[in-house]
Amino acid sequence: MKIGSKQFDLTLKNYMEPVVCKAVNRILKDSHYCACQRCQDDTMALVLNQLPSIYYLRAADEAAAAHELEQEYLDATLALTQEAAETVHQAPRHDSDEPYHLMNYEVTAVELGFGEILPLTKACTCIQCLEDMVCYALDQIGPKYVCTTKGAAYARLDELCVKRGAQRISLFFQAISYVDRHRRHSAPRIEHHIDN
Ligand SMILES: [Zn+2]
Ligand SMILES: [Zn+2]
């Protein structure tokens, strides 16, 4: 993400993705549906959009937390995947050679939003705090996965940016305040160092 002229490379992961990936592999393996990469990714996008996104996972043991998540969501995910696989099977898009990308567009939209808002605040902008803010906001907003080509991606992003209304801005501020109250960074905040 970009704040002013500074570029920050955030590591963001929706912990729901591996759960859905597992369900998609399982359903497609035991069915007559096409299991090419495109059909797999189209199915994943449909399923992921019907589940909450879980980017913000605060756990000492990440593997255990991911396992717990799978236990909680796998059954529901399998049922959703069955429906989604049928939808993709009815209208497959695997005949197109156009390169595509499976992504959650909200990630880019939220990063852009924080990039605009953070310079107006005193929020800590260390990588840890930035990741936590973006993850927190993404989970509140919910996912918008799409499997689409680059040109279409930009069109869609424009649309998301226009939709960024007051509600979304207040959510960004909520995320900033939450992360400030639950700070995880190891280094002291430079601007408030003396207060600490
Ligand atoms: Zn296919
Ligand atoms: Zn920080």
Image (cartoon, rainbow, N blue to C red):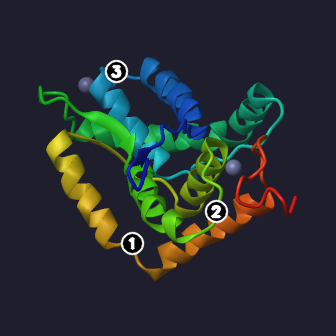
Give the quadrant of ligand 1: top left
Residue on which disc 1 sits: 164
Q: Secondary structure at mark 3?
A: loop
- Give the number of the mark in front: 2 or 3: 2
Return the residue nearer the eye: 190 or 140: 190
Quarter occupied by residue 37: top left
Q: Which residue is mark 3?
A: 35
Horizontal side of 133 relative to 109 (left or right) equals right
Residue 149's spot in the image, x, y percent?
Answer: 19, 39
**Residue at the disc numbered 2:** 123
Quarter of image, res 110: bottom left
Q: Residues within 10 Å of mark 2 (few under 14, many from 20)?
A: some
- Spot occupied by residue 83 in the image (x, y as percentages of width and height): 43, 43
Marks 3 and 1 sit apart, C-alpha to C-alpha, by 36 Å
Return the x and y of residue 99 as percentages of the image width and height.
18, 29
Q: Is residue 158 above or below residue 63?
A: below
Question: Can residue 34 be seen by looking at this rendering?
Answer: no
The image's mark for residue 59 is none
The front one of 33 and 159 is 159
Q: Under tag 2, what secondary structure?
A: loop
Label 1 packing within 10 angstroms: few (<14), some (14-19), many (20+): few
Could you say where residue 50 lies in the image, as x and y percent from the top left?
49, 53
Mark 2 and mark 3 lie on one chain; the one further toward the N terminus is: 3
Q: Is mark 3 within 8 Å of ligand 1?
A: yes
Amino acid carrying label 2: it is Ala
Residue name at image x 54 percent, y 42 percent: 79
Ligand 2 is within 8 Å of the C-beta of the residue at disc 2: no
Mark 3 surroundings: few (<14), some (14-19) or many (≥20) residues within 10 A: some
In this rendering, the answer to whether 85 lies above or below 104 is above
Please say whether residue 153 is visible from this viewpoint. yes
Q: Amino acid at mark 3?
A: Ala
